[in-house]
Amino acid sequence: MKLYFDEAGNTGTDLFNNAQPVASLASTSLDAYECKELISPLLRQGQDEAKYSVLRGTVRGQDALLGFFSSSCFTPATTKVMVADKRFVVVAHLVDKLIEPAAHEDGVDLYDGDAQIAYANMLHLAGPFMLPDGRWDNVLKAFLAAIRRPTDETYEALAFVLCSALQYAVTHGEISQAILGLAKAPDNLHRYLDPFIGTAAFDPMPNLFASLVNYWMKQSDGQFHAIHDQSKPLKTSEPHLRLLMTPQSSRTIGYGDRKFELPLRISELTFADSKDHPSLQVADLVAGAAMDLFCVHLGYRERTPYHDALQSSGFINLIIDGIVPSSDITRENDAQAGETSIVDGTTSFIREARAARDE
């Protein structure tokens, strides 16, 4: 089966991009003929490609988009899209890279019961109140600077900001106690963060891609040919994606209901020009609409009648998952005997894949 992918709002590890606070990745199995028929009404004379950002800018274009998305061709079985709130991605990585290792050293598995997700949700919502007057933003920005440009200077700046935050948390324990999960981080930044230098770990798009492929794998057996629109940010993650595609013994990793299958069943991964593939243009339109709609849902843009109509069209059903905050901070998905966390399982798989390629 051929799957066509395109993205919107992909800024790589520039996760505090105010102009594009949400990223999305869309995929479709609709073939070229179906997609050409769908796109044809959107094109004006002389155009050979439909772009969401252009159509979205006029009332006429919005009407055309609403007609496009109302097609019965669009169901979760043929078209899937995922979204990521970039600010929440930063918080999730803060928990995963600076808090989880310390908890693990103390004998606590934060992945058990999805506790790391609950922790990230809590910090995302309460962080500005736990560390007011810009202190929380300072932590996130210093952390992002250190992972984007890992140098002694950025590490020192992060350590200083973390120490200041911890000092505030100690003196305001009632409201800032959760910040103390970062207590070990200032003295262990190199140990915690250096293993990720030069990897795709902090770019949300490879995670969205792998997760999206897994949803297709649950739907259909066999191998997939993944065709992605030419994308410089995702292209830089190609080596990582190809590692996840390395033929190895199949395994299911994760706890509870949050499971992930490796290797990705992709027999071929290619990058192509959307002008040559109507299916990529459809994926572009879906990705653009998902990003637009979630910018509204997450409070980054003002809601308009167009957004109400888009949601009413059933488009929301195509958004199957994402990396987005929730008010849910409950514990669920407890680990069962013999299960491996997604992080540990992925790390083990990559280690095996690299060893196999080096043979």
Image (cartoon, grey):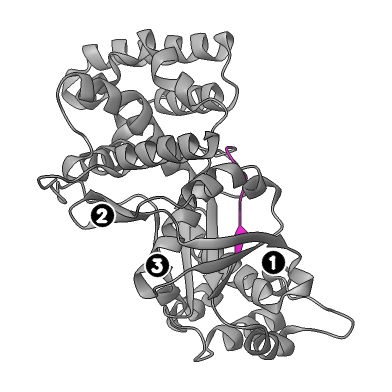
- Between marks 3 and 2, how big is the CA–CA gap? 15 Å
Is residue 286 among what the camera can see? yes
For marks 2 and 1 on the same chain, the one whose residue lies earlier in the sequence? 1
Q: Is residue 175 left or right of residue 39?
A: left
Query: Disc 2 vs disc 1: which is toward the camera?
Result: 2
Residue 10 spot, x, y in % from top left: 61, 50
- Please say if the residues under marks 1 and 3 sit with CB atoms less than 8 Å apart: no
Q: Is residue 94 above or below residue 32?
A: above
Q: Secondary structure at mark 2?
A: strand
User: Which residue is denoted by mark 2 in the rendering?
Assistant: 258
The answer to whether mark 2 and mark 1 are in CB contact below 8 A is no
- Alpha carbon separation for disc pair 1 and 3: 31 Å
Q: Position of residue 222 (x, y in %)?
A: 43, 71
User: What kind of residue is marked 1?
Assistant: Ser
Q: Is residue 71 above or below residue 88?
A: below
State the separation of the CA atoms marked 2 and 1: 34 Å
Number of numbered labels in the structure image: 3
Callout 2, which amino acid? Arg
Q: Nearer the viewer, mark 1 or mark 3?
A: 3
Which tag, 1 or 3, sits closer to the chain's start? 1
Query: In the image, what residue occupies the spot 51% across and 61% down?
Result: 266
Q: Which mark is residue 53?
A: 1
Residue 114 vs residue 127: left or right?
Answer: left
Image position of 323 (left or right of 130): right
Classify mark 1: helix, strand or loop.
Answer: helix
Q: Is residue 138 visible?
A: no
Name the residue rendered at 55%, 39% in the picture.
15
Relative depth, front residue between 278 and 66: 278
Q: Which mark is drawn over residue 217?
A: 3
